Image: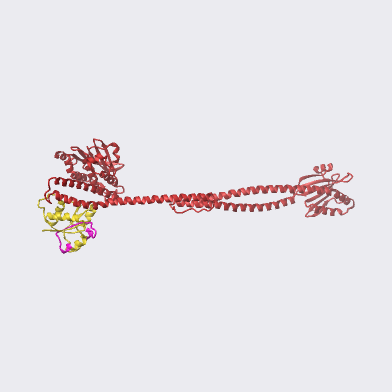
Chain colours: A yellow, B red
């Protein structure tokens, strides 16, 4: 069972992501604070990290930077899920080493498709996005 | 500071000249009357003297002639001391023959003729003979060699019993009068000079008090003209100029207050406008986050992933989903508008191929064209040049225009998208048009269409939804690109939105012309590949 780690400061969004991904058969760990999340991720690296950009204690970009500096997190697939639109944010986070970027509000199917791609699983044909 | 000096000079010149003229006039009058009185006193004393001395002198002359008695010389000396103006004494006998001639020089008397037995010349002067014969005293101003004019008195000596013996001719000089006049003139001149100096000083002082205030006022006006409203003019002359300065200060007070209020208002407005722009640009996060949860859970519900829905619930979920979708679109529009409104001028520009862009836009909205059974044609020439623009923002512009056309065109209508080269205002550019067969816009409302949040009327708002922000965004974006957007419409027949974009932005002539990219345009099929498809798929 693939392990997905979700970091978002908004509990409702965390809840949604957890529900959607668990329904898709993933094991989901969540955190609402960047700092504790980083420690947890490095202690038990997931298969994919789903990361929000705007968080009060630690910016998503900052977390991503620190993660990439650590050998444990250097190659961890990261999907950015952000309410910030605009090419600058997308390009900025991709340059920092994010693997994919989707904007809020996103469609569940789009999210799942991106995650599947990142964990290297193919869609089992249930959804055709 | 030139004007006040001129004023000062004028005041001084005026006062001094008035004083000089009046002083000169009175000095002249004074000297004239002085001269008159001097002359008349000289002449009257000369006549008196002559009348007095003619008889005694005649007796002395007679005595001298007969006896050679020297009393004549003493007598002449006394006479010379008696009248200081006397310059010459002559004595004629009854035949008019000069018997004595004496000159007075510096109080000394010199006898020149009338020696006893001497041959004296007979006086031939006709003017003298007349008075001598008339036996009465006569006087006249005459020319006298070397001395200008002298006063000549002819006084016959007539004895008590009426015998005429000799005639005295006395000459009196005006030199003393001239000297007196000269002295008086000098004194007058000194006083005149003093008067003029005093007048100059007084007028300069007066002028200074007047122009000093004027200078201060002028300096004050210049300060106000240089935006220094906080300084005041201090004039303490107690006259109209002080009043003027006080009025000026009151005016400056009011100006300062009004300008401060205006500046205040301006700063407040600026910051309000800025915070409005920032607010609109920054609320996106706040608006999108709750929508994320809503959209996601509704999708889970709608997909039945949280369990089968009771009949009726699925309908409710669908309505919720549709409205969340609409809300999302509106928020995206709002955010996009705010972004362009705020950072418009700083948008990164690149070369944009409108052919590709327009095809992409039609493709994006293809599902909606199908949904409303609309015919759509795309007419773009192969050699359409590229424009310099922000691709993202231009895409938004044409998405909005096409979306608008779809929204207002009834089922089965048609939409035409065209592009061509067009020279406008002396500049090369590309004109793109989106024409629909929709409801159209009344002529009197054409102008207002591009205003923010404007939509033709409330009923059409209800019919078609939307906030009308899309066209405001189009207008602002094209404005930022240095282009033009305009609208032709006939109510009930449809509208054409025209967007003209310049090939280069002013001052960027070097940029982006390598670009009649026929290869890229050629991949598109020129005219209307979509049109037939749109028709047939309905």
Q: Is residue B454 left or right of residue B13?
A: left
Position of B38 relative to A34 (above/below) = above
Residue B488 in picture, x, y percent from top left: 27, 38
Residue B415 in picture, x, y percent from top left: 20, 39
A106 or B190, which is in the foreground? A106
B507 or B115, which is in the foreground? B507
Report if residue B211 lies within the magenta region. no
Q: Is residue B347 left or right of residue B238?
A: left
- Which residue sits furthest left? A124
Residue B490 in picture, x, y percent from top left: 26, 36
Residue B238 in picture, x, y percent from top left: 54, 51
Q: How many marks?
A: 0
Report if residue A48 lies within the magenta region. yes
Q: Residue at x 84, y 53 (%)?
A: B75
In which quadrant of the rendered view does residue A7 lie? bottom left
Determine if residue B11 is in view: yes
Read off the magenta span.
A40-62
Determine if residue A100 is in view: no
Q: Is residue B500 left or right of residue B322?
A: right
Q: Residue at x 67, y 52 (%)?
A: B188
- Split into 4 quadrants, where in the image is the N terminus of chain A? bottom left
B506 or B438, which is in the foreground? B438
């Amino acid at each position: 069972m693939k392990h997905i780690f979700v970091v978002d400061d908004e509990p409702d969004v965390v809840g949604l992501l957890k529900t959607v991904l668990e329904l898709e058969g993933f094991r989901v760990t969540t955190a609402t604070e960047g700092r504790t999340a980083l420690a947890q991720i490095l202690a038990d690296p997931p298969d994919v990290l789903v990361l929000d950009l705007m968080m009060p204690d630690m910016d998503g970009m900052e977390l991503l930077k620190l993660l990439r500096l650590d050998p444990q997190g250097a190659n961890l697939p990261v999907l950015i899920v952000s309410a910030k639109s605009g090419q600058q944010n997308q390009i900025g986070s991709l340059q920092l080493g994010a693997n994919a970027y989707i904007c809020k509000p996103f469609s569940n199917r789009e999210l799942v498709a991106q995650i599947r791609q990142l964990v290297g699983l193919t869609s089992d044909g249930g959804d055709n996005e | 500071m030139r004007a006040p000096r001129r004023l000062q000079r004028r005041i001084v010149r005026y006062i001094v000249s008035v004083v000089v003229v009046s002083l000169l006039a009175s000095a002249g009058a004074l000297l004239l009357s002085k001269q008159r009185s001097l002359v008349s006193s000289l002449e009257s004393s000369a006549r008196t003297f002559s009348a007095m001395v003619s008889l005694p002198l005649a007796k002395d002359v007679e005595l001298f002639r007969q006896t050679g008695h020297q009393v004549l010389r003493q007598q002449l000396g006394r006479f010379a001391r008696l009248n200081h103006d006397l310059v010459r004494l002559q004595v004629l006998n009854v035949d008019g023959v000069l018997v004595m001639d004496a000159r007075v020089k510096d109080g000394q008397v010199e006898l020149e003729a009338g020696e006893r037995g001497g041959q004296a010349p007979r006086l031939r002067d006709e003017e003298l003979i007349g008075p001598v014969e008339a036996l009465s005293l006569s006087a006249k101003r005459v020319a006298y060699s070397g001395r200008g004019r002298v006063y000549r008195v002819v006084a016959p000596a007539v004895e008590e019993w009426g015998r005429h013996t000799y005639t005295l001719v006395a000459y009196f000089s005006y030199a003393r009068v001239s000297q007196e006049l000269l002295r008086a003139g000098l004194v007058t001149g000194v006083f005149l000079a003093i008067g003029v100096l005093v007048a100059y000083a007084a007028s300069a002082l007066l002028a200074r008090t007047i122009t000093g205030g004027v200078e201060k006022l002028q300096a004050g006006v210049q300060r106000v003209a240089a935006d220094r409203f906080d300084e005041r003019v201090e004039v303490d002359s107690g006259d109209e100029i002080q009043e003027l300065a006080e009025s000026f200060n009151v005016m400056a007070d009011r100006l300062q207050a009004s300008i401060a209020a205006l500046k205040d208002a301006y700063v407040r407005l600026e910051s309000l406008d800025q915070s409005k722009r920032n607010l609109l640009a920054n609320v996106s996060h706040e608006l999108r986050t709750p929508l994320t949860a809503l959209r996601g859970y509704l999708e889970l519900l709608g997909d039945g992933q949280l369990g089968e829905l009771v009949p009726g619930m699925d309908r409710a979920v669908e309505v919720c989903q549709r409205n969340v979708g609409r809300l999302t679109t509106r928020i995206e529009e709002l955010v996009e508008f705010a972004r362009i409104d705020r950072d418009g001028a700083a948008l990164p520009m690149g070369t944009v191929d409108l052919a590709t862009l327009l095809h992409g836009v039609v493709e994006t909205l293809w599902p909606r064209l199908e949904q409303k059974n609309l015919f759509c044609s795309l007419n773009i020439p192969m050699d359409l040049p590229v424009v310099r623009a922000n691709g993202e923002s231009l895409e938004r512009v044409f998405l909005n225009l096409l979306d608008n056309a779809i929204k207002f065109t009834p089922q089965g209508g048609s939409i035409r998208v065209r592009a061509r080269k067009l020279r406008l205002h002396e500049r090369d550019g590309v004109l793109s048009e989106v024409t629909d067969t929709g409801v159209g816009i009344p002529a009197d409302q054409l102008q207002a269409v591009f205003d923010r949040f404007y939509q033709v009327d409330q009923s059409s708002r209800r019919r078609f939804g939307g906030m009308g922000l899309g066209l405001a965004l189009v207008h602002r974006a094209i404005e930022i690109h240095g282009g033009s957007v305009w609208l032709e419409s006939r109510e009930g027949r449809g509208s054409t939105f025209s967007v003209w974009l310049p090939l280069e932005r002013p001052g960027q002539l070097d940029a982006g012309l390598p670009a009649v990219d026929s290869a890229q345009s050629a991949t598109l099929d020129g005219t209307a590949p979509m049109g037939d498809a749109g028709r047939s798929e309905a």
